[in-house]
Image (spheres, coloured by chain):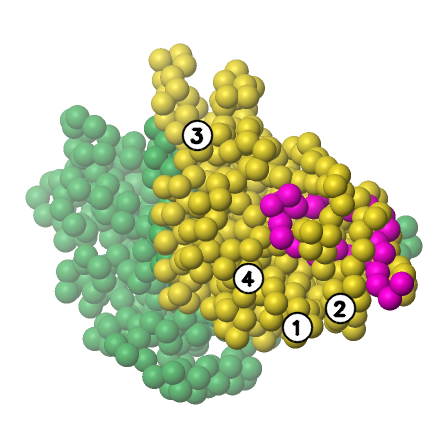
Chain colours: A green, B yellow
Amino acid sequence: MAVDKEELQEFQKEVKAWFDANAPKDPGFLLPQSFMEVGTDKQFHFLRDWQREVYEAGYLGMAWPEDYGGGGKPQPFQDIVNREMAKRSLPFMVNIIGLSWAGPLILNMGTEAQKRAYIKNILSAEDIWCQGFSEPDHGSDLANAQLRAKKTGDHYLLNGSKIWTTLAHVAKYMILLARTDSQTNTKYEGLSFFLAPMDAPGIEIAPIRKLTGEYGFNQVFFADSPLPADCLMGEEGEGWMVAVKTLQFERGAEGGQAGGTSMVRTSVGEVVALARTVKRGGRPAIEDAHIRDQLVRFLMEEKGMRLNGARAKIKPLASERPGSLLMSVKLLESEFQRRLGAFALSLQGMNAAYYMGDPEAADRGRWQRGLFNAFSATIGGGTSEIQKNIIGERVLGLPKS
Amino acid sequence: MSLVGESSAWKIAFSEEQAQLLEVAAAFCREKSPIEKVRALMTEEKGFDKSLWDEIASLGWLGVAAPESYGGSGLSLAEAIVLAEPMGRRLFASPFFTTTLAAQMLIRAGTETQKKRWLPKICEGTIATLALHEPHGDWDLTNITARAEEREGGLRLVGEKRFVLDAAAAEMILVSVLHKDAPACVIVEKAALPKAALSRETVIDETKRSYRLKLDGITADCQSLLSAEKMTDALHHVHLAAILLLSAEMCGGLSGALDLTVEYLNTRRQFDRFIGSYQALKHPTVDMLTGWDMARSHLYYAASLFGKMAAADDAEAAVRMAKASASDAFAFGSDRCIQFHGGMGFTYECDAQLYRRRALWGEYMHGDSAWHRARLADILLK
Ligand SMILES: Cc1cc2nc3c(=O)[nH]c(=O)nc-3n(C[C@H](O)[C@H](O)[C@H](O)COP(=O)(O)OP(=O)(O)OC[C@H]3O[C@@H](n4cnc5c(N)ncnc54)[C@H](O)[C@@H]3O)c2cc1C
């Protein structure tokens, strides 16, 4: 679809004006910085309302088909919205698992009925989605998932447990990887992929307290929970292939996401601002040569990651060692945020030892919380170590570990 | 972790011409500069292959960044970058870096007569170089102690210059001096060099040819001074151009070191496994890759700002970032390249040392990364 440049510019103006007028105000409590940190009802409702508002304004799923609730427009329109949201550090889209991985997956390989049933409510945040991949005994080794799905008549019976399940406590559906056959040659066979309703009998959800002291993820137990057979996505026994596809959407290696941000990143600019306010030996920390050096390192890295994104779009500059720019996004961003978080704390000197809840904690303790929560991204979605294995093997062609 | 859709508004400009040049240069350097050739040239006094130099000249590579009116192709330094990167990758030895820089100096501060006389020749293959560095070793090019004194209607040069690259092969040298207490630059032609004015330096990168230049006894006429009022700007420009070219050379070099490392990790076996299957080697090798990616993104961004309409501060920041990022990444990559070759890596025969030496060379020419970061702090953290 050809896109008119002027139309885009016009649209950008409209978008800016809309966000100027409608950006949510400070709710008076600490909002989570990513979808993996939604711990209280207050936070959840605030974020869900915000997503609905963005959708109803026409700014979400703009490139998804109109038939299913999308906007039917070319992708560049959504890109403009995404950029504007990121630039303003607006609250993220709480249903991102639906928007960025379940949704694209359903549009990509779901049946007509599935598309009609799920897509619109993903966009409006009416139905929250969660992801049941990890299990207590199998995390990085995802293909070893053992939760059983046994076919009986027109149902599957689920038995077992999923863990670290973000948003399960508010989710209507789960994308679920389960074992339908345990007598296979390899672990990759015998898995099946389901779009599972969370209100089935026999499902129990136990919130798990995070290292910050808050909540956000859960353990989900299945005891003889019946699952209608038409919840199957793809063919029975070919769930691994579907899971890999899902991970590609999740990691951004494949496009088709509805849009919106998944997290509010800490920018180096914010840390620079912090360095101007906190003191070192009576002087603003930003005057300290060592601190300046580190700030510049972070600025360079932050910029380098954005420029990686820009270079990935230029074919002749991205054709050597293909895939490396896209495949390393998650690794680089998440590790960067973790290190930046620790640095931001170090700027506060002794006061870094305050924590959320104490009136003396800088910015209500967001830096302390941010440092801990940064691990959500270095661990969740495949750990940094696993990312390095994948990049080493797929991009550099190194032998398997 | 979906990070899609959060791409930046920063754009890298890359033209069709650049793409073509990059492809041609990559193939040229791969073919003409295999590692055996690099090593053979290292042992020769001259240090480069004159016939390849002539080829480069006939391909028009010496004039890409020179105006058409002086025999160039009227493109910019961004095009020289796509040549320098593949050269760095194959450790291709030639006076390309110095000749390109000398041309930049002339374009920036040469008088009309000087430009007319020298630029067309340079575009056709005349080798030129710059003598900008001094015994104090300062990276600030305006810290000049060499002098040009007026004598008998002409100029008499006093002092000493260091790290004058490719000087023995050069037809002319642009020497920075103080003239009437202000920074100036004098064109010194080969014929004006007294015997023994040049002596070869032993430098860490054996593919480079570097000389000490004794200025005492060199005379020149006043017409050989570059335009005085443009000097400060020209020195700054040449400094940034040098950094940009070095960044390109280092990005290329790192890519070569990465290839060498990966190849060894995929062929060497210990404990009945390919050593590349050990994560203690695999993961740092991925760090090399991401370091290369990042440095390269900085490089091409800096190239697209350089000499364009971009604000001076933005362009300067981008170029310094490119240098700091490339030299850190190359330092790490070439260091690991040695370590991951085991005992083999400790040998002169192993090519890892060539990359390590090149990385050190690139790092310590025109400012190391800490020095550039200090400059960046002044720009970015006002
Ligand atoms: C905040 C958060 C939210 C999450 N949300 C979800 C969710 O919604 N749905 C879901 O399904 N999962 C979720 N996860 C789970 C996440 O995907 C797993 O925690 C992750 O894949 C790691 O698995 P594990 O916890 O079993 O750790 P393990 O696999 O046991 O790993 C332990 C350590 O060993 C390392 N390791 C393991 N294997 C290798 C190897 N081959 N090579 C090198 N190192 C290795 C790991 O990197 C890690 O450092 C979430 C996790 C977090 C932290």
**Number of labelled discs?**
4
Q: Main secondary structure of the magenta part?
A: strand
Mark 4 falls within which chain?
Answer: B
- CA distance for labels 1 and 2: 9 Å
Nearest to the observer: residue B133 or residue A218: B133
Between label 4 and label 3, give the one nearer the viewer.
Answer: 4
Asked if the residue at tag 4 contacts the one at tag 2, i.e. Cβ–Cβ closer than 8 Å, the answer is: no
Q: Residues within 10 Å of mark 2 (few under 14, many from 20)?
A: some
Residue under the image location 55 percent in, 62 percent down: B121
Q: Which residue is mark 3?
A: B36
- CA distance for labels 3 and 2: 45 Å
User: In the structure shown, which secondary structural element does the residue marked by tag 4 occupy?
Assistant: helix
Q: Which residue is mark 2?
A: B223
Q: Residues within 10 Å of mark 4 (few under 14, many from 20)?
A: some
Q: Is residue B76 visible?
A: no
- CA distance for labels 1 and 4: 13 Å
Note whether B116 is above or below A182 in the view shown: below
Residue under the image location 18 percent in, 35 percent down: A190
- CA distance for labels 4 and 3: 31 Å
Asked if the residue at tag 2 contacts the one at tag 1, i.e. Cβ–Cβ closer than 8 Å, the answer is: yes
